[in-house]
Amino acid sequence: MERDLAVVLLSSGMDSAVCASIAKKNYRLAFLHVQYGQKSAEKELECFQKLCEFFNPEKVLIAEAPFLKKIGGSSLVSEELPIPEEEEVGIPSTYVPFRNGIFLSIAASWAEAIGAKKIFIGVNQVDFSGYPDCRDSFIKAFNQAIKEGTKPETQIEIEAPLLYLSKKEIVRLGVKLGTPFELTWSCYKNTEVACGRCASCRLRLQAFKEAGIKDPLSYQDK
Amino acid sequence: MERDLAVVLLSSGMDSAVCASIAKKNYRLAFLHVQYGQKSAEKELECFQKLCEFFNPEKVLIAEAPFLKKIGGSSLVSEELPIPEEEEVGIPSTYVPFRNGIFLSIAASWAEAIGAKKIFIGVNQVDFSGYPDCRDSFIKAFNQAIKEGTKPETQIEIEAPLLYLSKKEIVRLGVKLGTPFELTWSCYKNTEVACGRCASCRLRLQAFKEAGIKDPLSYQDK
């Protein structure tokens, strides 16, 4: 029997790349990458294309969502707000309002159009950055919204396999599954070499350190 | 006390224009229009700008969502699928997968960024076209997703005031509230004059006829 198709939301970060490795075990792959004017857009796209060469998905969609930059309100997209290099209190300035809602909507639309049965998203509520749209309760509510807002015969379910893993466990799982971490990009900036200082770099460095595994990426100041 | 801000999803069709008139009674207005490669995009934008002149909203966002045309699967966006001029059985070919999910996500993101408390959407499940994302159960589920996926202090609620009205009642309500129907556009096509034959034109013509009110728009073949 032919395997079902799964849409994988792939930012090119380490979490979504591990998600792709998990999805690959049981599904045919459809990779979705969103360009929304994030500061690291160019670098992410470059890594996305390398990850496509590696995983060879059956379908690829690069979705442009320029309205998120217009909406602003986040240091990830707004030129006037620099990416912080220190830990922030509460919800960080890198939070993009309801971003995962937008990503999951695009994924649900595409999944319905191509007949995919799953949407993989690499959200994580353990070592997460305090984003409200990375929690289990959000994923559950969105699953229900997809069920109610698509055709009766459409069966799409969100899979968030990293939800309860620590960052360290995600690294170890990725190594076990052969995730090509050398092709991923986690840094919030668009520099040639990852900055090593933004929240995303810090989480990643910490994760590899705790896992006792060498991060194949290079960092500034290292 | 200053009134709260409300995001109004405004396609420029008659339903969303009546929604704007309803929102205006109690809220400061933020108009959101989505251009997604729909065949009537140009005409809708022209009408949206006229509606902005009429309502004079405090904020305006024109969001470009070109991925919906890439996703395809609907006669509203796909060049190879003509807009049907006869009644269709089941879910019509004009259905754009999970479109209202995408629209509501963009609206929720913007609402959170600008501090709006409501999102008005002109969905209607009585004389609707059979779209799953126009039902009360979908709106309820999406409300929950917004609640879970935004900051704890964010309070955004979807208002769908036309949900249980017939098309005839929507026309009458619009007339009562002074909705400028002459500035709206319902036709799925991009012709200079509305076609009068697509499902959207047929629903509108029927609505005005049943309401006993003259539609200020001109139609081909009339």
Image: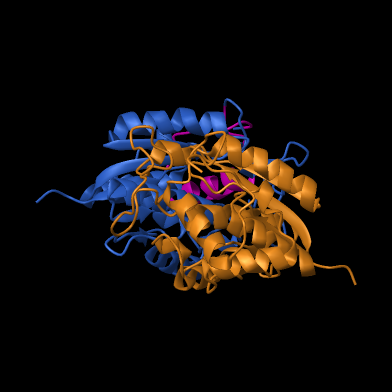
Chain colours: A blue, B orange
**Residue B92 percent location from the top left of the image:** 35, 53
**x then y, percent, for residue B152:** 66, 70
| Relative vertical location of residue B193 with respect to residue A209 in this rendering, above or below | above
Please give the name of the residue rendered at 42% of the width and 52% of the height, measured from the top-left corner: B199
Q: Residue at x 69, y 64 (%)?
A: B175
Along the line of sight, the residue nearer the viewer: B143 or B100:
B100
Q: Residue furthest top?
A: A192
Q: Which residues are magenta?
A: A193-221
Q: Is residue B91 left or right of residue A196?
A: left
Looking at the image, residue A126 sits to the left or right of residue A87; the answer is left
**Front residue of A143 and B101:** B101
Does residue A218 show up?
no
Answer with the quarter of the image where residue A89 lies.
Answer: bottom right
The one nearer the camera, A222 or A48, is A48
The quarter of the picture where the C terminus of chain A appears is top right
Q: Position of residue B66 (x, y in %)?
A: 51, 37
Residue at image location 13% in from the left, 48% down from the top: A2
Q: Is residue A132 left or right of residue A105?
A: right
Residue B172 lies in quadrant: bottom right
Q: Nearer the viewer, residue A4 or B48?
A: B48
Q: Residue furthest front?
A: B222
Residue B113 visible in the displayed image:
yes
Instruction: Specify whether residue A202 is painted magenta.
Output: yes
Give the residue drawn at x 50%, y 63%: A125
Query: At which x and y percent is residue B100?
Result: 50, 56
Q: Is residue B94 magenta?
A: no
